[in-house]
Image (tube, rainbow, N blue to C red):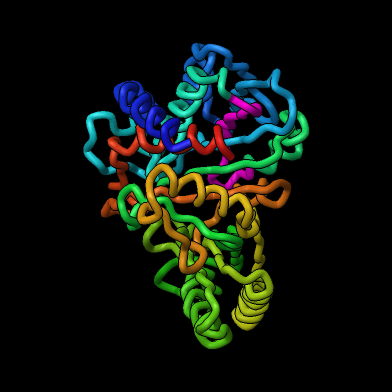
Amino acid sequence: MASVGVKLLSGAESMADDLVEWRRAFHQFPELGLEEHMTASKIEGILSSMPGMEVVKGFGLPTCVIGRLGGELGGKSLACRAEIDAVEVREDTGLPFSSYDNRVSHVQGHDAHMASLLGAAALLSERREILTHPVVFIFQPAEEGKGGAQHLIEAGLIDTFKIGKMFCVHWIPHLPYGQIITNKGGVTAHSSKLHIGLMGPGGHGSTPYLTADPLYLAARLQIELQGMVTREVNPEKTVVLSFGRIEAADVYNVIAEETHLWGTLRSTDRELHSFVKSRIEEIAKGLSRLSHIAASVEYMLDYNQVINNENLVSDIFKYGTALIGSEAMELLRSPLLVGEDFSFYSEQIPSCLMFLGTGMEYGLYHARYDIPENLLPFAAAWSAYLALFM
């Protein structure tokens, strides 16, 4: 087992140049969810060049690409997933292969996820004669807030490819370089995208008394809602409410008739999550009535917590310890407050989401986020190793 892993690590190192080239190409040409046409074409081309690889394009979503090795073996498949979409963040890394599009970038590591999973596919393609079960490589579109996983499941992904278990490796900064971190049970948070719309009479900035001023109410709401979190939620519980986007008038001296707030709510407790959602709606609508403003509260893209299968995590620790040692693997002290549509898979089949620490300075979605490319061979070998033995 460990000797096979060592050979995989050596094989991955020998293809390091390809891994870097793939990562940089994905990084330079990022695409938003459901628009990943260039990305999908490159993935399809690389997978199609691998001996024994069956490639399916457009399953469930037009830009989805799926590769399968060992389909003739029968039985349940093991699946590995990588996300392929980018986000609307302007990159500021100064890299020579920075995003060509000032609006869009891979500041969440999906470029590395794709490259390393392609590397795993290539390693297993070369060793397909030792496979004991089919392995499915899922390059999933629309992970960033568009429910790509849900679309694939509703299209029959699990039954079509006879998937019995599944894993995903997510690169993450602020955790030790090269460390594999996961958890038995809950590993992420319940996550909701939140929109509050406020509508009332606007006017000129010189006569605010003639308006209802929805923007002023938006400011009050943010304060009141944060107060609710600190005064109504047990501090021993975990909940985060953050607003990242406000839309109002385009002109500095105009009080807009409409103001829109966009934010995110996250908690590791399902009942607490539901409670805070209901309180946000009560507070927003109560304050709006006092201000003679109409308010709407809308929750979108509710992602449940990713629940890792305990037996799967135990197997990963057993096999992983044999290859990289127990000091390189760690259980989370508590779930991370990230939202992940991998939760849709974990609700259907035994699954494991694990994190690969990069030890980098800037966090996910920061304009200067980057990944250490010398981790690409390890990540490729790690996924290939787990796919062989799990």
Q: Quadrant of the C terminus?
A: top right
- In the image, residue 39 above or below residue 163: above
Let me know if residue 264 appears in the view.
Answer: yes
Tell me the chief SS of the magenta region.
loop
Q: Nearer the viewer, residue 134 or 147?
A: 134
| x then y, percent, for residue 329 | 41, 54
- In the image, residue 151 above or below residue 351: above
- Boundaries of the magenta span: 131-147
Left or right: 212, with 134 as reference point: left
- How many numbered marks are there? 0
* Residue 292 lies in the magenta stretch: no
| x then y, percent, for residue 300 | 65, 55
Residue in the image at 65% along x and 23% along y: 58
Residue in the image at 68% along x and 21% along y: 71
- In the image, residue 201 above or below residue 375: below
Residue in the image at 45% along x and 42% along y: 87
| x then y, percent, for residue 220 | 49, 78
Quarter residue 279 falls in: bottom right
Residue in the image at 53% along x and 74% along y: 238
